[in-house]
């Protein structure tokens, strides 16, 4: 009878599922399903694994972020494309305290590739690139057919043509309870940029004056649109 055969197969499947559950619970790592992994199954950020230097995972909702906070995460780095309002909503939805870090200055990291664009520019293989990137401390600029700035190629990274900076937005940044500001180094004048941030944060100079002093030090035009919920290429100044 087919019903008897199906019942036996169903029973065998249940027994196999119970066995696999017990085996996984006994021999597996229960935190693995809740942690980001690479394509080979290595847990990102695991100090004992081959992906120890890749601790980042991206979240855009407070529930997931709060879950990781409960598992021991201590710092949250907001994606640079998130606006002030989105960052506030995510922070307010947390049930645990976490340090908050934002990208405050530098060319925006837009995409990564397994290939090195600088090596391809010279028709070289990635493993025999002769370190051509040393010739382009601020990357290789790309322009539209009309000659307008479009993107910047920097090794394996595609970056914005403009320089994202929140110097003039520091009062709003501090009001949101941001703990750490990330400043991406540029080919020259990085110490001066850091000093301007420090002076503005300490109240030694107004943020608007800090931005004005920083403009000649930037490798490209400034922008801050993402922080204001606008296209990232825009520059919005506080009223």
Image: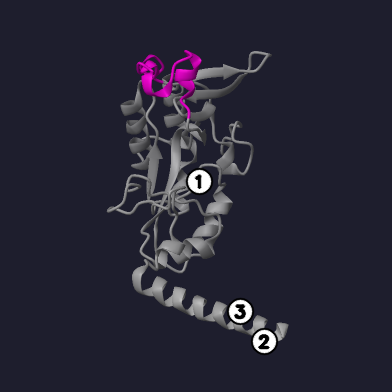
Residue 19: percent from the left, percent from the top? 45, 77
For residue 154, side relative to residue 148 (left or right): left
Q: CA distance from mark 2 to mark 1?
A: 56 Å
Point out the image quarter for the N terminus. bottom right
Are discs 2 and 1 less than 8 Å apart at CB? no
Q: CA distance from mark 2 to mark 3?
A: 9 Å
For residue 192, side relative to residue 176 (left or right): left
Residue appearing at x 46%, y 19% in the figure: 118
Q: Secondary structure at mark 2?
A: helix
Residue 136 appears anywhere in the view: yes
Q: CA distance from mark 3 to mark 1?
A: 49 Å
Magenta range is: 115-137
Q: Which residue is mark 1?
A: 79
Which of the pair 225/31 is nearer the observer?
31
Residue 206: percent from the left, percent from the top? 42, 36
Q: Which is in the foreground here, disc 3 or disc 1?
A: 3
Q: Earlier in the sequence, mark 3 or mark 1?
A: 3
Residue 239 appears anywhere in the view: no
Q: Residues within 10 Å of mark 1 (few under 14, many from 20)?
A: some
Q: Which is in the foreground here, disc 2 or disc 1?
A: 2
Q: Which mark is residue 4?
A: 2
Which of the pair 147/164 is nearer the observer?
147
Vertical comparison of 64 with 8: above or below: above
For residue 49, side relative to residue 40 (left or right): left
Q: Is residue 120 magenta?
A: yes
Q: Which residue is mark 3?
A: 9
Q: Secondary structure at mark 3?
A: helix
Which of the pair 36/105 is nearer the observer?
36
Vertical comparison of 239 with 1: above or below: above
Residue appearing at x 47%, y 65% in the figure: 66
Q: Residues within 10 Å of mark 2 (few under 14, many from 20)?
A: few
Residue 239: percent from the left, percent from the top? 59, 39
């Amino acid at each position: 009878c087919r019903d008897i055969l199906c019942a036996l197969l169903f029973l065998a499947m249940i027994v196999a599922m119970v066995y696999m559950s017990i085996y996984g619970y006994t021999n597996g790592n229960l935190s693995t399903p809740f942690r980001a992994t690479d394509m080979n199954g290595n847990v990102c950020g695991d100090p004992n694994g081959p992906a120890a230097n890749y601790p980042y995972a991206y979240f855009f909702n407070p529930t997931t972020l709060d879950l990781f906070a409960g598992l021991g995460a201590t710092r949250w780095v907001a994606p640079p494309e998130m606006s002030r309002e989105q960052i506030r909503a995510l922070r307010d939805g947390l049930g645990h305290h976490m340090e908050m870090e934002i990208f405050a200055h530098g060319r925006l990291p837009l995409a990564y590739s397994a290939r090195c664009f600088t090596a391809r520019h010279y028709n070289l293989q990635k493993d025999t690139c002769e370190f051509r990137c040393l010739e382009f401390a601020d990357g290789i600029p790309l322009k539209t057919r009309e000659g307008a700035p479009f993107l910047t190629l920097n090794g394996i990274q595609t970056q914005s043509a403009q320089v994202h900076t929140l110097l003039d937005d520091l009062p709003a940044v501090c009001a949101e309870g941001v703990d750490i500001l990330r400043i991406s180094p540029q080919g020259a004048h990085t110490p001066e940029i850091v000093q301007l941030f420090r002076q503005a944060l300490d109240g030694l100079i107004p943020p608007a004056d800090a931005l004005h002093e920083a403009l000649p030090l930037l490798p490209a035009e400034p922008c801050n649109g993402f922080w204001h919920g606008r296209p990232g290429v825009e520059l919005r100044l506080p009223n």
